[in-house]
Amino acid sequence: MKILIVGGGTGGTILANNLARRLKHEVKTGKARITMLSASDKHMYQPALLYVALGRMSTDELYRDQASLLEPGIEFQVDPVEEFSLDKNQVKTKSGKTIGYDLVVIATGSRAVPEEIPGFAEHAIHVYTEEAAVKFYQTISKFQGGRVVIAVGVPHKCPMIPPEVTFCLYDYFKDRGMLDKVTFHYTSPIGRLHGLEPVSKWMEGEFAERGITSETLFNIKEIDGARRVLRSEEGTEAPFDLLVAVPAHRGMQVIEKNNLGKGGWIPVDKFRLNLDGRQNAFAIGDTTNIPISKAGSTAHFEAEALAENLASIVRTGAPVRDYDGKVFCFIESGKDKATYAMFNYTTPPDPKPPTKSLHWFKMAYNQMYWASARGLL
Amino acid sequence: MAQKQVIDVRGAFCPGPLMELIANIKLAGVGDDLEVLSTDKGSATDIPAWVKKVGHQLVSSSEDAGVWHIVVRKAK
């Protein structure tokens, strides 16, 4: 049975490794074949971009060679898919190859689209690419004081980035002895500070303690660089001296071009992760349109559930379990404290007061991630 | 031609019903209707509040067996 995994990010890599281990015997005897097609020979640990942006990690710590993360037996090719022919069970790659499959998993991820906001490139900073994270640090290290606005776009990857970047920036300027010269203002697109109500309530207390002001129902429309003002879709304005924005995201262009989902988000069953109306095509991670967090941890837990199901399909013809919506997100609440939010489709999160030990666990996880990508954690 | 879209966010905690509506309304055409299905009773107040502030149109809002059905028309 030929299994094709399109995308070598967190979801695709954990899935491939978990599956290769489960199907070790079948791969060895030629009964199963696992192929991964990716756009890059490198694998980026995206959460580390926050630390690059704060000058606490160097850019070379972001990457590993993708091939070095994969189990033996996985055929890895740097040759991104350009055409999906789901009715024919085949894809066409950039190099012109046509590759057939029995089971396909699409894990192409998402991309920030700051270019959709007029003025963003010239007047705002963000943490979603290596280049942007480096620019972020260059900008904050030269900042001499004024009004910092943290603005949140929709939809965005990693729901904890807005509070994390706010609290970490606060501590960054505190360490520089600048708190008397800096004010912080946070804008949220919805009626509270965060999508998760318990996290929102926790943020309210943390904001009050630090004197951070906020405005809700504020969706980024455009940036007037001449006046140094951020305008919202709702008709309000936020003046700034330093604008930190969380840009909106879309799925990858190849998904939109192949009409697999509006905005690049593929509709799937939220439990079985199969594409609507198809039993041999699946999507995981940011790529799906499931209304849950777009985060590495979502991709991780989806990949584990799907690997178990695909192995079972190879062996028995049927899947064995549902993805339960599990998500676990660390929340850095400054330079040396952290908490977390864990939830699933039926149980809301209950964030606890931040501790130093959780921050250090997060620091350790930043290294352990590579074992996680290998499917070992 | 205007289209109707259902956004089923029953049981979703994060990013939540209003965030999903905002994400989907960006991709919709002017005149399209978006029906949000939500089990979060807060949706009955925060979605209309946002719709009014931003200038879209609230078509209807009703509750049936613990599920809120809120229909919004993209106006601009």
Image: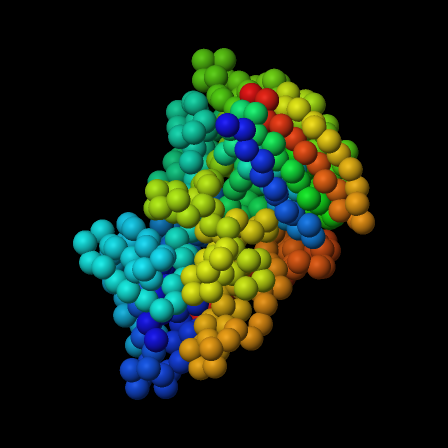
Residue at the spot x=35%, y=42% of the render? A257
Left or right placement of residue A203 versus residue A281 in this view: right
Instruction: Identify which residue, A302 or A198, lies in the foreground.
Output: A302
Image quarter where the N terminus of chain A lies is bottom left
Residue at the spot x=54%, y=64% of the render? A272
- Above or below residue A264? Residue A150 is above
Residue extending farthest to the left is A96
Residue A38: which quarter of the image?
bottom left
Left or right placement of residue B37 versus residue A130 in this view: right
Left or right placement of residue A325 versus residue A363 in this view: right
Q: Note whether residue A172 is visible.
A: no
Residue A88: which quarter of the image?
bottom left
Residue at the spot x=72%, y=40% of the render? B69
- Above or below residue A25? Residue A57 is above
Q: Note whether residue A83 is visible.
A: yes
Colour mapping: rainbow
Residue A303 location, x and y as percent? 48, 65
Instruction: Identify which residue, A214 or A248, lies in the foreground.
Output: A248
Residue at the spot x=54%, y=24% of the render? B30
Residue extending farthest to the top is A227
Residue A328 location, x and y as percent? 60, 59
Instruction: Identify which residue, B70 or A146, lies in the foreground.
Output: B70
Residue B73: which quarter of the image?
top right
Q: How many marks?
A: 0
Residue A142 location, x and y as percent? 43, 30
Residue B71 location, x and y as percent? 68, 34
